[in-house]
Image (spheres, grey):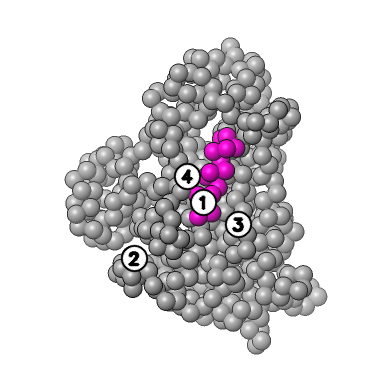
Amino acid sequence: MKIDWKAYQTNGFFDELIDAQGNVRTHGKQLAQFFSSLSEEELVKARAVADLAIKEMGITFTVYNEGNMIDRAWPFDIIPRTIGKKEWQTIEVGLKQRVEALNLFIHDLYHDKKIIKDGIFPKGLLEKSVNFRPQCVGITPPNNIWAHICGSDLVRDANGTMFVLEDNLRVPSGVSYMLENRSVMKRVFPELFEQVSILPVDDYPSQLFDMLAAMSPRPDDKPEVVVLTPGVFNSAYFEHCYLAQEMGCELVEGRDLVVEKDDCVYMRTITGLQRVDVIYRRIDDLFLDPDAFLPESQLGVPGLMRAWSKGNVALVNAPGAGVADDKVVYAYVPDIIKYYLDEAPKIENVPTYKCLDPKECNYVIKNIDKLVVKPANESGGYGLLIGPKSTKKEQQATIAQIKADPRNWVAQPTLALSTVPTLDGTEPDGRHVDLRPFILSSGKDTQITTGGLTRVAMVKGSLVVNSSQGGGSKDTWIVDEEAK
């Protein structure tokens, strides 16, 4: 039986392909028509082709389970998510505004702290920040950019309004999967890309390299750019390899680099030492330099912070950028935008309760069964409590953690996240999604991926989209509705 979109149930959620009346939205008409023309056998074959392509291309992710590392094939759904170009253009403006304000905020915290002196941002919040790096105070990176690469997670509510759910400013990951999702779709349905006007994403590696090169302390020379990885045991190692290969850069580990007496960074090669200008680091701050942070770190490069502070090498993202990658700081971003840019946010935050505020904390505890409760600095869905789907025991355990350290917790309403048709067997069924676009900032130019990484909850009714928690992914299409 072929797909009948009139029979598709939105179940009261905002569905991004089918509206409440059962009609296909404008930006998805060609896609819906194509999928409704496929037989069950063709859908089964298409899924098999996608699975085979993922295995052949080696697209994997790593999960940690009870001390074990497990490599798994990337979970992928063959029905793309579509967003209209006109809407996307407004989203781009909002993301650029947000990243500009966040970079100004980070720079201020490591210099004059005007936002604290003016009473907009609490001094105590900064003092208890686990991601503030005193070693970065007074340092000025090129063009005052700290977060060169940002992945801001977006969600829609029941009305279809887009919100920023959180910002990822430390070592944002996932862009390789966005690119590989597109490659898989082109293998499975090459004819679709001839029928639908889809904005490209495959120029991201060149955009990334250009941004990295623009950070070089030796702008007149051809810069040496490297990707610094913790190694094969890191969960994002696939991405580190992929991006290095796509950019034509060396993939290095800490042991491959050395800081010499001239406070410059060099790469060990078979022909001798070669100076490095830009390091796209995929290692957390505390492991970057055992001289500056954790002395026991075997992943970093002794003296790296010294070389960076003297302007002899660029680090992307800059150490210390994670001070703004905090779910409590997130709650202040609308105020941060207003303070630095004198503008209202063009994309709103999800309403957020800060447990460091006694009144808001009391509300969270009393209504914990209705809220999503998050620790300030966890990622990957870890530590999350989804109130309506939690047990009394889980709620009480979270309340105890909140009372022990209120500054470390925030809560948000349980949003009715938008859905996108996702194949359940050979029938489409709505599954909840989020979206992570990637923003590149050099200080002179800001570029945003056309779409981003769509993560989808593969389990019916689930709100958890993280791959480490059983989520999957889709190709994201920004569709030009006006193209013929």
Closer to viewer: mark 1 or mark 4: 1
Quarter occupied by the C terminus: top right
Which amino acid is tagged 4?
Leu
**C-alpha span from label 1 to label 3:** 10 Å
What residue would you read off at disc 3?
446
Residue located at (46% from left, 67% from top): 106
Determine whether the residue tagged by mark 4 lies in a helix, strand or loop. strand
* Upstream in sequence: badge 1 or badge 3: 1
Q: Residue 154 carries which label?
A: 4
Does residue 93 belong to the magenta stretch?
yes
Residue 282 seen in this snapshot: no
Quarter occupied by the N terminus: top right
**Front in this rendered view, residue 85 or 260:** 85
Left or right for 120, reference 219 = left
Q: x, y percentage for residue 424?
A: 51, 24
* Upstream in sequence: badge 1 or badge 4: 1
Labels 2 and 1 touching (C-beta < 8 A): no
Q: Residue furthest front?
A: 342
Residue located at (64% from left, 75% from top): 313
Q: Which mark is residue 121?
A: 2
Q: Kindly indicate the quadrant of the structure image that contains residue 156.
A: top left
Which amino acid is tagged 1?
Leu
What residue would you read off at disc 1?
95
